[in-house]
Amino acid sequence: MSKTRKRIIILGSTGSIGSSTLDVIRHHPEEYEVAGLAAGKNISLLRQQIHEFKPRMAVVKTWGDSLRLQKEFSKTGIDILAGEAGLLELVTKLEADLVVSAITGIAGLKPTVAALEAGKNLALANKESMVVAGQFLKKIAARTGARIIPVDSEHSAIFQCLQGQKKRYLKRVYLTASGGPFLRLPVTDLAERKVEEALKHPRWTMGKKVTIDSATLMNKGLELIEARWLFDLQPEELQVLIHPQSVVHGLVEFQDGSVLAQLSQTDMRIPIQYALSYPERQLSFLPALNLAEIACLEFYPVDDERRYPLFFLARKALQAGESYPVMLNAANEVAVNAFLEGKIMFGQIQAIVEYCYRQHQPVELTSLDDVFVLDRQTRVRANQFLKQLVNLKGKQR
């Protein structure tokens, strides 16, 4: 009798996490089948994925791409849908055991919510959803019985360290950060770094947005907010350590002085495989970690606000809570996108986020609609300030 394979839906299948997820599935064909795929603009890669994994449903961003793919795959029985409506149909109507949420930014929030409302277990790589709407996602999961399994290497590490532990014994959680590509660069040289420099991460291969967030350390600030909701922790229970080797991904300190840590190779396919197989563990197809070869593991506090101002701003947003994380995330998305498009300098990412923080008037968030309203309002404000920066840059030429 053949074993029943776990059915997987992947949101953001052509991105870094999505592609890595498919590689894990490729190495474990007896364990998983791809039920559905969703992608944005990379239609050529999605086409290859559809040919290889033969999902029952695929979703693209535009109707034009959808019509072209429908024609190409008309004889296969694969449904090709488009847009937000297609995403929501994918996660609600298609039968699946696990939804991998890997769409970057707040764009991933609605399908993430829909998957949880449908009672589907969620492998969460879209940290922004938990940052802006963690309190709502946890309530939905509790109501529907859906399980949220973190995919980020740091949160996966904490999740693993907490297995079988009583929360009342926990004292502190540590997320680790590589320090990004500018860890050793003089602070005075940071402001004018170019896009290609910021994208040269010393340890991880990731998508562009998260790689820039790593360079500013905003990534770690957002991860603190995510961890607050994932593990029901208070701000004072959350800490970050700079760990350049990126071998230790997270640590949990207990009241008795014991510290548990999770170590592994610097490869996102490891936490992805854990999320797919949970609560089981599967044989890895990757090289084993060799601590003797690494020899040295370094850890440093994050104590230089001049080097990582956005991290400290994120900590303030974590402490303030309520609407501040929503504002912070929206402003950062606008700023990082502008930097990637060459509109601003690296140091001006900070300027845009700080401007929005100063202008923010805290509001009570009573529903997901409130989250989306505040997100849109913040983006308008951030883009208005961005326009001023761009105009000023033009006048200085």
Image (tube, grey):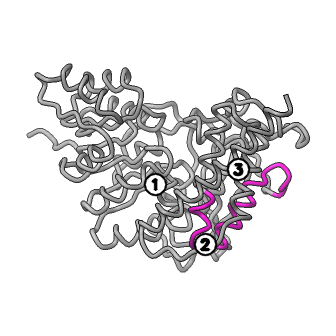
| Residue furthest out toward the left | 1
Distance from Cα at disc 3 to Cα at disc 2: 24 Å
Regarding mark 2 in the picture, which secondary structure is present there?
A: loop
User: Which labelled disc corresponds to residue 68?
Assistant: none
Crowding at mark 2 (Cα within 10 Å: few <14, some 14-19, many 20+):
some
User: Which labelled disc corresponds to residue 321?
Assistant: 2
- The x, y position of residue 256, in whole percent, is 64, 76
| Residue furthest out toward the bottom | 168
Q: Residue at x 73, y 61 (%)?
A: 313
Left or right: 72 as drawn, with respect to 168:
left
Residue ID for mark 1: 150
Distance from Cα at disc 1 to Cα at disc 3: 34 Å
Front residue of this view, candidates 111 and 251: 111
Inspect the image, locate mark 2, and give the three-letter code of the amino acid beneath it.
Gly
- The x, y position of residue 48, in whole percent, is 32, 21
Q: Is residue 153 visible?
A: yes
Q: Residue at x 78, y 51 (%)?
A: 308
Identify the magenta region: 303-328
Q: Residue at x 36, y 46 (%)?
A: 100
Residue ID for mark 3: 385
Q: Residue at x 63, y 43 (%)?
A: 247
Regarding mark 3 in the picture, which secondary structure is present there?
A: helix
- The x, y position of residue 14, in whole percent, is 41, 31
Inspect the image, locate mark 3, and give the three-letter code of the amino acid beneath it.
Phe
Earlier in the chain: of badge 3 and badge 2, it is 2
Left or right: 254 as drawn, with respect to 389:
left
Mark 1 or mark 3: which is in front?
A: 3
Mark 1 or mark 2: which is in front?
A: 2
